Image (cartoon, helix red, strand yellow):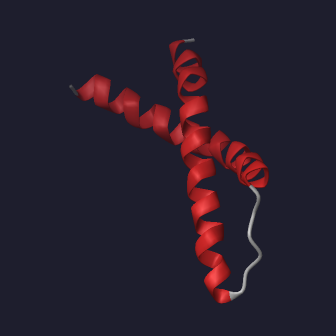
Amino acid sequence: MKYLLLCALLYPFVTGAAAINVFMLALMGRAIGLPSLTPVQALGLGAVLSLGLTILAANWVRRLTRDG
């Protein structure tokens, strides 16, 4: 139960971080000829990627609180 709450609390922050990273990566990709993404597309891709990333972040936080 606490794990799911932690995931729910972390999800918006992880989504924002993932979206920013995807958008910046797409901007850098323009240098080698890749198409750019709109901010909305980057947010959508960031939301999908953040599902798995949230689990990783929650496990990291749990490990920090358990060991600390």
Q: Nearer the viewer, residue 68 or 22?
A: 22
Q: x, y (%) of residue 23?
A: 64, 59
Task: Write the residue at 78% across / 53% down.
Answer: 41
Task: Write the residue at 65% across / 88% down.
Answer: 32
Residue 66 quadrant: top left
Q: x, y (%) of residue 17?
A: 54, 45
Residue 60 quadrant: top left
Image position of 54 (left or right of 45): left
Image position of 2 (left or right of 8): left
Q: Is residue 34 above or below residue 22?
A: below
Q: Is residue 34 above or below residue 64?
A: below
Residue 31 quadrant: bottom right
Q: Nearer the viewer, residue 27 or 13?
A: 27
Image quarter (top left, top right, bottom left or bottom right) of the C terminus: top left
Q: Is residue 16 above or below residue 42?
A: above
Task: Write the residue at 59% across / 67% down.
Answer: 25
Residue furthest to the bottom: 32
